[in-house]
Amino acid sequence: MSIELSLLLAIPVLGAAVLAAVGARRWAPEVNGAFSGAALLAACALTSRVIGEGSFTALSEQFFIDPFNVFLVTLTALVSFTTSLFSRPYMRIESEHGRVKAQHLRLYHSMYQLFIAAMLVALTSNNLGLVWVAMEAATLSTVLLVTLYRTPASLEAGWKYFILCGVGIAQALFGTILLYFAAERVLGGSGMTALLWTNLNEVKGELEPAVLTLAFVFLLVGYGTKVGLAPLHNWLPDAHAEGPTPISAVLSGLLLNVAIYAVVRCKVLVEGSLQSELPSRMLMAFGLLSVVLAALFLWRQRDVKRLFAYSSIEHMGIITFAFGMGGPVANFAALLHMTVHSLTKSAIFYSVGHAAQKTGTQVIDDIRGLVTVSPTVGWGLMMGSLAILGMPPFGVFASEFLILTTAMRQEPWSTPILLLALGIAFAAVFRRVQPMVFGETTAKRLPHSPALLPVFAHLAIVLLLGIYIPPYLADWYRAAANLIAGL
């Protein structure tokens, strides 16, 4: 195993162990941030190696790094680091105001690092069985985080998350078993080799199409539940609304990406075996359904975190639809949209967290005039909302424009549906956010300084990506898009 990959996987595991022992101490948030920062440095080193040397396997080929997953590894490490910086003052205030008991902070910090470790293992594993194990570990760790407040609503949300995602991950397990059944006939050997993605990709044309078709159905339903695709999305709004805001940020900005990564990896295999468009059509159908339903549900929301949770369902639907269309351009647009959505949505949740703390509520109608009492929080929320709604010149506009123009060329029937849904979502979110920021003041000042550096750092990157994509980053996206397209 390379030293970069070893450090990347070992750092959050070590962080979880250390914080399990000292996570209740006053300086534990700084330790959490230090481990997250070290993981980001390891991810950057790993990225530099892939850019310089290309793809490679490690640890008896059980781990595999290529432009697709190393891109998501870096994004995951970046957002987890900035979230740990936001988490430091946020959770301290929650503890001071009695919402979180001191002994629960140990659980929070250790499970946060374990959650990051599970996502990194899922992204870098070459073994599809280990991907499933890592996704299950991510689910279990986040269940404990969602229920951190121990209120009836948070316990109900955690229980719903556990049951629905548990059923979904069981479907994914059955799909993985079917993949092994098809691969064993061609590759032989044990699951240690028959489930390696690199081996499966080499012989995908020889795998039994009927078995792979059934496998993909289970894998899409299973991992699609984790993505939050409609109608498998019911856990997501409750988990976002009832858990701590830093967890809402990483759930929306990171976990959904990891789940769709698993779906796309499986799509490449199954589409190569079937030599048909069935997997693509299924992704487009689920994606469009998610966009439309989320846009309609946005109008009914009264809780600000639930509002942006449904926005996440909408954007994951857009990404799924783009990967379903396939081809270098659509894949490029989907990867760009994954980047800007993760950065923007996490920035929005950072702002929403501070806004909720200032007003003592998450009810939208009770949050007014943020720009008066805290201009940075108010403008952070407004700019983040405009960015996620696709206003130029932010990067979400660029990625959505690419997806729409590609749809006009490849799937013209879908363009009116997408445009209508995006218009409904724009109106629904803007009508809620505008009075929160500029309405008559109801917010109050609290004796703390909000951690807004992560908010504006994320939004600055999103703005840059809407105006100019650096050549090395464009090449990175292009290489990953071609890999997914099989070119």
Image (spheres, grey):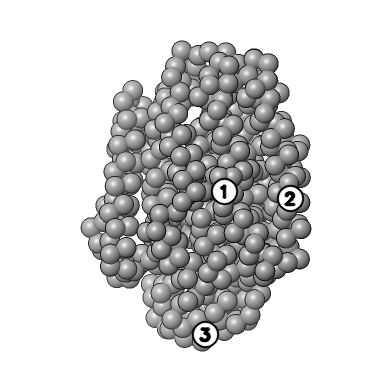
Kindly indicate the quadrant of the structure image that contains residue 156: top right
Identify the mark at residue 421; answer none if there is no mark.
Answer: 2
Circle 1/circle 3 CB separation < 8 Å: no
Q: Which mark is residue 137?
A: none
Residue at screen point 39% across, 58% down: 471
Q: Pick whichever, 346 or 419, lies toward us.
A: 419
Q: Relative to residue 187, is residue 467 depicted above or below?
A: above
Q: Looking at the picture, how far across and down is residue 91, in whole percent? A: 45, 26
Ranked by sequence position, the earlier of labels 1 and 3 is: 3
Helix, strand, or loop for circle 2? helix
- Tell me which label, 2 or 3, sits earlier in the chain: 3
Give the amino acid type for the residue marked by disc 1 in the picture: Val
User: Residue 444's quadrant in the figure?
Assistant: top right
Query: Residue tagged by mark 3?
Result: 205
State which tag comes first along the sequence, 2 or 1: 1
Q: CA distance from mark 1 to mark 3?
A: 36 Å
**Residue 396 shows which numbered tag?**
1
Instruction: Determine the CA span between mark 2 and mark 1.
Output: 15 Å
Label 2 and label 3: CA atoms lie apart by: 38 Å
